[in-house]
Amino acid sequence: MKLLQLERLVTGWRQPAHQPLSFTLGRGKILALAGPNGAGKSTLLAALAGSGARIFSGDIQRAPGLRVGFQTQHLPPVAGLPLSGAEWLALTDARPQGLPEWLSACLHRRLDKLSGGQRQYLALWSILQAPADLLLMDEPGNHLDRAGVASLPAALRARAAQGAGIVLVSHDAALAQACCDRLVQVEPWND
């Protein structure tokens, strides 16, 4: 079943960011967007998520009732926030079952006492557990330590196996190769 279909889509903020893109994404599939910095990959995700980026031309078709989860590159500040990792998961309706041991052992700690990599993986886990049909993930490997990077492909594949479609932006070729079914090259807009 098609979750998402793009036909010659061009998105941007004040002006077009990338060349026209066309692709289809079905349930259980992971698609990676590749391209140089500034090519418009994150902008495209923002447009797909309905987060303010403009559609200049082309068409997006979404499955009826499509539920979208969106992970950005920016973690919210947690300094002084008196929430533990377990409380964060409860607030986001994410289950701790299946969380790697290196992180599940730290769930009792406050978020501001976790390392940046631990917080990043916890945020990713929350998105992966979201009741969404389509997950949009912008550089999910950023800020992860080795254990997080090693655990990420299996977590993405497991979520896809549950029927979610995933669009992933990553400069990490090894991550894309380890978990993606398809790679779409994003070319910057040329005036």
Image (cartoon, helix red, strand yellow):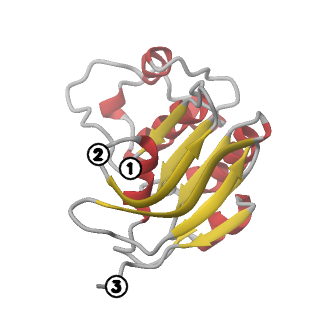
100 sits to left or right of 37: right
Residue underneath mark 3? 190
Number of other residues with Cα within 10 Å of mark 2, as a class: few under 14, some 14 to 19, many 20 or more: few
Mark 3 and mark 2 residues within 8 Å of each other at the beta carbon = no
Amino acid type at mark 3: Asn
Amino acid type at mark 1: Ala
Q: Quadrant of residue 51?
A: top left
Query: Which mark is on residue 81?
Result: none
Does 153 sit above or below residue 126?
below
Number of other residues with Cα within 10 Å of mark 3, as a class: few under 14, some 14 to 19, many 20 or more: few
3 sits to left or right of 84: right
Q: Name the one closer to the observer, 137 or 50.
A: 50
Q: Name the one closer to the observer, 103 or 59.
A: 59
Q: Position of residue 7 (x, y in %)?
A: 57, 61
Q: Position of residue 64 (x, y in %)?
A: 62, 30
15 sits to left or right of 108: left
Q: Position of residue 141 (x, y in %)?
A: 51, 57
Residue underneath mark 1? 46
Residue furthest out toward the bottom: 191
Mark 1 and mark 2 residues within 8 Å of each other at the beta carbon = yes
Q: Residue at x 38, y 67 (%)?
A: 40
Residue 36 visible in the displayed image? yes
Amino acid type at mark 2: Gly
SS for dot 2: loop
Number of dots carrying numbers: 3
Q: Residue at x 37, y 46 (%)?
A: 116
Q: Residue at x 46, y 79 (%)?
A: 187
Residue underneath mark 2? 52
Residue 147 visible in the displayed image? no
Q: Quadrant of the C terminus?
A: bottom left
Mark 1 and mark 3 residues within 8 Å of each other at the beta carbon = no
Q: How far separated are the C-alphas under marks 3 and 2?
A: 22 Å
